[in-house]
Amino acid sequence: MIDNEDDYFLHGAVGTESHDKIYQIYNAVMKKIPERDRFDLQKKHVVVVLADKTNSFCVPAWFILQQSEEICTSISIHLIVLSPGIVERPRRSAVYTIAHELAHAYLGHSYFVNSDEEAKENEIKADQQVIKWGFKKELMSDPDNYIYGNGIKNVFEP
């Protein structure tokens, strides 16, 4: 199902030490995700970028219009932007963050939600998916995870 199982694309900061480190971690995460789920992620047009200066996040469901004389269609793209600081974190924490952001795309979470409660539910559901994919040790190693850690408190409470 996967065209090239040994190589998953990571855009941005190509040729830098940060890119090389995250590329290895990102590929390890993708290989651990079950094949059917990796295939579903590909169908969702997930683009992962290592940015110069930002926090890690996922912006799902951008719509791009494709036009030609005969056809007009749109596709959605889930953009996952990884912080360059992710390479400074312990490997398990970086693995968790990448898996968590991929889970948002896999689950089709929208960036725009109706309430903080819905946003909290999405964070918990993403962590539940991370566990289903076999990353529980990595999740547990990150104190800011949303199920067992401080993620909800840090993000949603003043």
Image (cartoon, helix red, strand yellow):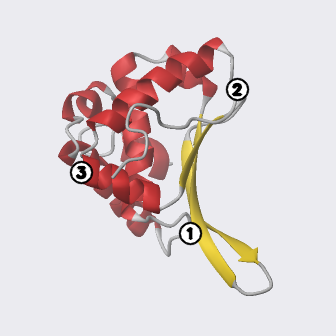
When asked about the image quadrant of residue 30, the answer is top left
C-alpha distance separating marks 3 and 2: 30 Å
Q: Is residue 141 left or right of residue 41?
A: left
**Which of the two labelled residues, at mark 1 and mark 3, occupies the earlier sequence position?**
1
Say which residue appears at 46% left-offset and 32% top-offset: 7
Circle number at residue 13: 2
When asked about the image quadrant of residue 82, the answer is top right
The answer to whether residue 40 shows anywhere in this view is: yes
**Which of the two labelled residues, at mark 1 and mark 2, occupies the earlier sequence position?**
2
Amino acid type, label 2? Ala
Say which residue appears at 28% left-offset and 34% top-offset: 139
Q: Label 2: how many residues lie within 10 Å, few (<14), some (14-19) or many (20+)?
A: some
Q: Is residue 67 left or right of residue 91?
A: right
C-alpha distance separating marks 1 and 3: 20 Å
- Tell us which disc is closer to us: 1 or 2: 2
- Expressed as whole percent of the image width and height from the top left, the position of residue 55 reads 60, 36
Q: Is residue 70 left or right of residue 91?
A: right
Foreground pick, 140 / 100: 100
Q: Label 3: how many residues lie within 10 Å, few (<14), some (14-19) or many (20+)?
A: some
In this picture, is 36 found above or below 52?
below
C-alpha distance separating marks 1 and 2: 28 Å
Amino acid type, label 1? Phe
When asked about the image quadrant of residue 121, the answer is bottom left
Q: Which residue is mark 1?
A: 112
